[in-house]
Image (cartoon, rainbow, N blue to C red):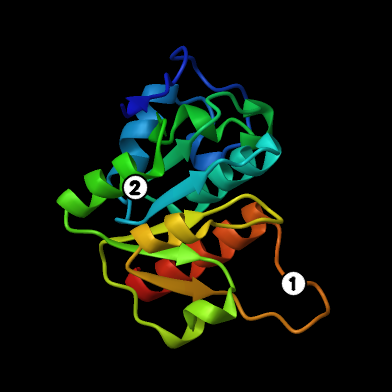
């Protein structure tokens, strides 16, 4: 079952809040409503991420690029401190299985991309693809990445080209890069 996380209390942001100057002294619900007007259709899906600071940082990136929603699969709790307050403005959902989220976003017309760099799946560099407007991106746990069955649920696989000796990027960094590239194509 897909459930929406609570936004928390509606409060007036202090001058110290981590928001742009324009939103200083606005109520949380008013900021949320204003951001909603400019959201794109990008959906981010995080599958069984153990290190929950990554989830919070990815939610923060979703705010920066005004993605439509973030889905967290598996463990329900995450450290909201790493969102720098943006969890109050984002559409964040929890689900028990990746399959139920993919079925749902597909019913809305989305193309689902696994984000990993497993050579056997012939992934496409994110710089070499034109993403459909309705794109959802699935990220797996650092280290093991996405399982073969998770990848099988997706329509295609994309990767972020790197040039150093490391096999992969931190999941929150990768999410930010994918969101940036999607936004660059659709803004």
Q: Nearer the viewer, mark 2 or mark 1?
A: 1
Residue 175 image point, x, y percent: 56, 57
Residue 134 image point, x, y percent: 26, 62
Q: Which residue is mark 2?
A: 68
On screen, residue 113 versus residue 11, left or right, reads left
Which structural element holds mark 1? loop
Disc ID at residue 21: none
On screen, residue 107 versus residue 112, left or right, reads left
Q: Which residue is mark 1?
A: 167
For image coordinates 29% across by 55% down, the residue present is: 41
User: Which residue occupies the foreground of this view, 30 or 82?
Assistant: 82
On screen, residue 93 versus residue 17, left or right, reads left
**Residue 96 sits above or below residue 60 on the image:** above
For image coordinates 39% across by 32% down, the residue present is: 93
C-alpha gap between disc 2 and disc 1: 29 Å
Quarter of the image for residue 54 reads top right
The quadrant of the rendering that contains the C terminus is bottom left
User: Which residue occupies the foreground of this view, 11 or 62?
Assistant: 62
């Amino acid at each position: 079952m897909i459930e929406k996380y609570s936004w928390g209390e509606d409060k007036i942001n202090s001058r110290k809040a981590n928001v742009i100057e324009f939103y200083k002294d606005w109520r949380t619900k008013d900021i949320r409503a204003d951001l909603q007007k400019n959201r794109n259709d990008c959906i981010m899906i995080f599958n069984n991420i153990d290190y929950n600071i990554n989830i919070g940082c990815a939610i923060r990136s979703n705010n920066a690029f005004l993605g439509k929603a973030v889905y967290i699969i598996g463990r329900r709790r995450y450290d909201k401190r790493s969102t720098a307050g943006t969890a109050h403005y984002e559409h964040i959902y929890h689900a028990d299985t990746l399959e139920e989220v993919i079925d749902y976003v597909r019913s809305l017309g989305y193309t689902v991309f696994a984000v990993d760099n497993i050579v056997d799946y012939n992934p496409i560099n994110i710089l070499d693809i034109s993403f459909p407007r309705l794109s959802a991106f699935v990220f797996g746990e650092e280290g093991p990445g996405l399982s073969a069955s998770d990848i099988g649920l997706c329509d295609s696989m994309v990767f972020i080209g790197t040039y150093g000796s490391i096999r992969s990027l931190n999941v929150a960094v990768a999410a930010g890069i994918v969101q940036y590239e999607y936004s660059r194509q659709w803004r």
